[in-house]
Image (tube, rainbow, N blue to C red):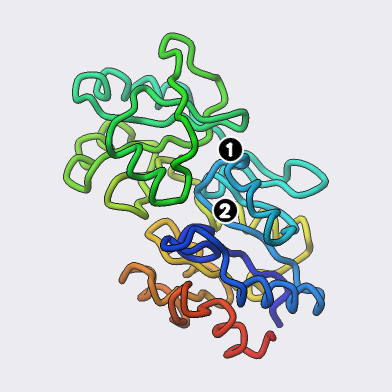
């Protein structure tokens, strides 16, 4: 019996085309809540970048930074930060190769530089109105939860050799999210589920990107969106229709949850 559902945001809850949550998804979320099912977000976004969801639905909690920082209305459930030596190890490489990187913290995100990939990504996720803030590279914050590095798949390999304690998660050709090797969405989901007394086989997840693959494999039921990358579809138990074609509603109806 499913007692909790975790949803990715971009390409899952929110359309890349309209930058909005489909009406059918909002209806499905309300129907699930009426049944007493707990509803959470599992995203690579920073906590502050999830606030806009309240326009559509008030989720029970958030797994942010790809599992690195998890919280609900009562406070922080779990957090896992970078070792500063890992961050320091790539700074000369970023500068030498003119690579944009976002240093992500709970208080806000800071960039070493702004380039066309950064602005393209902001447009992709409907955040073109946001003005990126440059970091003080001589005084980076102590608690960094995630790095978003704007590299292609080819550029990724030499970069990650400098970060043996970390792993890369890619959900766009423009970038990778870099987190601790022992972290990820499944870790955050497990911590949240433990807090709520929910077992692994009582969890359903929805996702579409490369950073959703591990949680699709982890959950009792993993659902990939029709617009998901091929690897996510292979990892899922079920592939639904696209986010813009009522994918969440259709899958929940398929499994008899609504």
Q: Position of residue 225 (x, y in %)?
A: 45, 74
Lateral position of residue 157 relative to residue 139, left or right: left
User: For the point 52% across and 29% down, which residue is it?
Assistant: 144
* Residue furthest top in the image: 138
Q: Quadrant of residue 149?
A: top left
Quarter of the rendering occupied by the C terminus: bottom right
Tell me the CA gap for discs 1 and 2: 10 Å
Label placed on residue 80? 1
Q: Position of residue 203 (x, y in %)?
A: 64, 71
Q: Secondary structure at mark 2?
A: helix
* 143 versus 242 height, above or below: above
Chain-order first, disc 1 or disc 2: 1
* 248 versus 91 height, above or below: below
Q: Nearer the viewer, residue 101 or 116?
A: 116
Label placed on residue 72? none
* 77 versus 109 height, above or below: below
Q: Quadrant of residue 85?
A: top left
Q: Quadrant of residue 190?
A: bottom right
- Residues packed near mark 1 inside 10 Å, few (<14), some (14 to 19) or many (20 plus): some
Q: Secondary structure at mark 1?
A: loop
Q: Position of residue 150 (x, y in %)?
A: 30, 38
* Residue identifier under label 2: 187
User: For the point 64% across and 54% down, which residue is it?
Assistant: 53
């Amino acid at each position: 019996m499913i007692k909790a559902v975790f949803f990715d945001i971009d390409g899952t809850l929110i359309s890349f085309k309209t930058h909005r949550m489909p009406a059918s998804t909002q209806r499905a979320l309300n129907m699930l809540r009426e049944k007493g099912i707990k509803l959470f977000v599992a995203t690579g976004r920073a906590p502050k970048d999830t606030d806009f969801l309240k326009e559509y639905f008030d989720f029970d909690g958030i797994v942010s930074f790809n599992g690195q920082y998890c919280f609900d209305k009562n406070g922080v459930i779990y957090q896992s930060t970078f070792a500063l030596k890992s961050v320091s190890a790539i700074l000369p490489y970023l500068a030498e190769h003119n690579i944009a990187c976002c240093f992500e913290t709970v208080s806000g995100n800071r960039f070493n530089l702004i380039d066309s990939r950064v602005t393209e990504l902001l447009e992709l996720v409907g955040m073109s109105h946001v003005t990126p803030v440059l970091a003080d590279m001589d005084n980076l914050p102590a608690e960094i939860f995630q790095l978003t590095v704007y590299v292609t798949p080819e550029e990724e390999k030499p970069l990650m050799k400098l970060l043996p304690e970390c792993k890369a998660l890619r959900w766009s050709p423009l970038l990778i999210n870099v987190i601790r090797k022992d972290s990820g969405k499944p870790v955050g989901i497990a911590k949240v589920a433990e807090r709520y007394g929910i077992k692994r086989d009582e969890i359903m997840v929805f996702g579409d990107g490369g950073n959703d693959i591990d949680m699709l494999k982890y959950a009792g039921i993993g659902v990939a969106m029709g617009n998901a990358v091929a690897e996510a579809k292979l990892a899922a138990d079920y592939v639904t229709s696209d986010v813009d074609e009522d994918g969440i509603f259709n899958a929940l109806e398929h499994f008899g949850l609504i």
